[in-house]
Image (cartoon, rainbow, N blue to C red):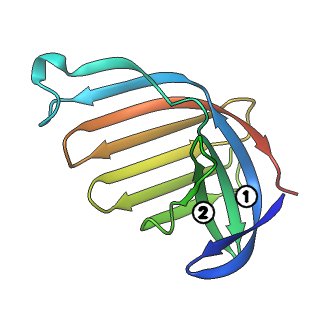
Amino acid sequence: MRWPFSYGGKDATARTLFACTPDERGWSYYMPSLAVPADKAGWREDSTAKGWAFELVKDKGNFDLITINPNGERSSALAGGAKITATLDEKPSRILISKMVRTREVHQYIFDSPITVYTTTRFGGLFARMSLMTAKCTKEME
């Protein structure tokens, strides 16, 4: 699928490589922090809100992770200051996203199986969390 979007302030045409719908449940480990007292730290079943989706796209040699909220609004990881490393020529295909803005976040997605596994590590700000989630993805690359 190809779709137009604004990339770096310029209109471009990007190609969707993977289109994903997260499962609604996964697990997160919350570390003691400002918002999480030590006695409340630990593993919890966690969830992704209904209606969210994400796509891995490539435009002019650059990879981006586009998050789509339940209202259909798109958000670019690159536009949000993320650095993206993708290894799609190896199996399994992987993408690593690091974002160091107000909070520090590292996301890793592993594609090429019926279920995509992704992890998120978030620290800084009010809480620190490591999550393991799954998603159903459609591979759309040629």
Q: Nearer the viewer, residue 42 or 54?
A: 54
Q: Earlier in the sequence, mark 1 or mark 2?
A: 2
- The single residue placed furthest to the right in the displayed view is 142
In the figure, is residue 138 to the left or right of 31?
A: right
What's the residue type where badge 1 is placed?
Asp
Instruction: Kindly identify which residue carries mark 2.
Output: 64
Q: Nearer the viewer, residue 53 or 95?
A: 53
Any part of residue 44 in sight: yes
In the displayed structure, 92 sits above or below 9; it is: above
Q: Nearer the viewer, residue 42 or 13?
A: 13
In the figure, is residue 82 to the left or right of 4?
A: left
Q: In the structure shown, which secondary structural element does the residue marked by tag 1 occupy?
A: loop
Q: Residue at x 59, y 53 (%)?
A: 73
In the displayed structure, 140 sits above or below 31; it is: below
Kindly indicate the quadrant of the structure image that contains residue 8: bottom right
What's the residue type where badge 2 is placed?
Asp
Q: Residue at x 32, y 26 (%)?
A: 29
Q: Find residue 136 and name its label.
A: none
Q: Residue at x 69, y 75 (%)?
A: 61
Q: Position of residue 100 (x, y in %)?
A: 32, 61
In the displayed structure, 15 sits above or below 42; it is: below
Q: Residue at x 40, y 50 (%)?
A: 106
Q: In the structure shown, which secondary structural element does the residue marked by tag 2 occupy?
A: strand
Structural crowding at the residue carrying mark 2, measured as other residues with C-alpha within 10 Å and reported as few (<14), some (14–19) or many (≥20): many
Q: Position of residue 107 (x, y in %)?
A: 46, 47
Q: Position of residue 63 (x, y in %)?
A: 63, 65
Instruction: Kindly identify which residue carries mark 1.
Output: 89
